[in-house]
Image (spheres, rainbow, N blue to C red):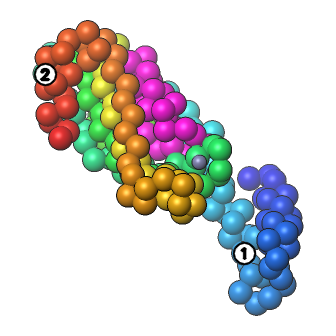
Amino acid sequence: MENYSKIKEITKSLLQEIGEDPNREGLIKTPARVAKAWDFFSQGYKADIQEIVNDAIFDEDCSEMVVVRDIEFFSMCEHHMIPFFGRCHVGYLPNNKIIGLSKIPRIVDAFSQRLQVQERLTTQVAETLMGILDPKGVGVVMEGRHLCMQMRGVEKQNSLATTSAMLGQFRKSAETRSEFLSIIA
Ligand code: ZN
């Protein structure tokens, strides 16, 4: 990351602004650690979906619902730059094409590792799968805990935000949708 030094500088200023002494022993290496952490938190901006899925799409005569549930995700709320995290459940109805199962969490990571709102993140995962697999339908449900809500005590401490995106058959057919929802329940 070219602007590593810039993030270090900004972090040092932030420490000063909140009333800290950036030169005290415990904080000396903090700007460098923060810069490194943000490099990780923002790596989704550099992710190339084509590259991620590249050799893992297979022709398969399969029309049964495929579900990967309980995918952990960690993201950053774009309103506060504070983490939100939780679980993501992804289902799709293949249309003679399937994707390597391990690629689905990688797609979730690609969109999580940037500043987000959970609603958009959910839709992006669903639309990406729709785009690369052309399946009969896609369903994505995300359940997230938002530290910007929990730490600041604005909302209930244990509140969980649930968002969903249902495309194709998952939107049109109540039966498909309820099959998916019962699998991830
Ligand atoms: Zn927030």
37 vs 121, nearest the viewer: 121
SS assignment for the magenta stretch, majority: helix
- Is residue 52 among the parts visible in the rendering? no
Residues in magenta? 108-132
Residue at the farthest bottom position: 25
- Residue 62 to residue 116: above or below: above
Residue 44: x and y in percent read: 57, 42
3 vs 125, nearest the viewer: 125
Please give the residue where the numbered disc 2 appears in the rendered image. Answer: 64
Q: Is residue 59 left or right of residue 132?
A: left
Residue 3 is marked as none
Q: Quadrant of residue 25?
A: bottom right
At horizontal 67% and vertical 63% (from top left) the residue drawn is 36
Residue 56: x and y in percent read: 34, 31
Which three-letter amino acid code belongs to the residue tagged 2?
A: Glu
Which label lies toward us, 1 or 2? 1
Residue 30 is marked as 1
Circle 2 crowding by C-alpha within 10 Å: few under 14, some 14–19, many from 20: few
Q: Secondary structure at mark 2?
A: loop
Quadrant for the C terminus in the image: top left
At horizontal 28% and vertical 47% (from top left) the residue drawn is 70
Q: Secondary structure at mark 1?
A: helix
Ligand 1 under 8 Å from disc 2 Cβ = no
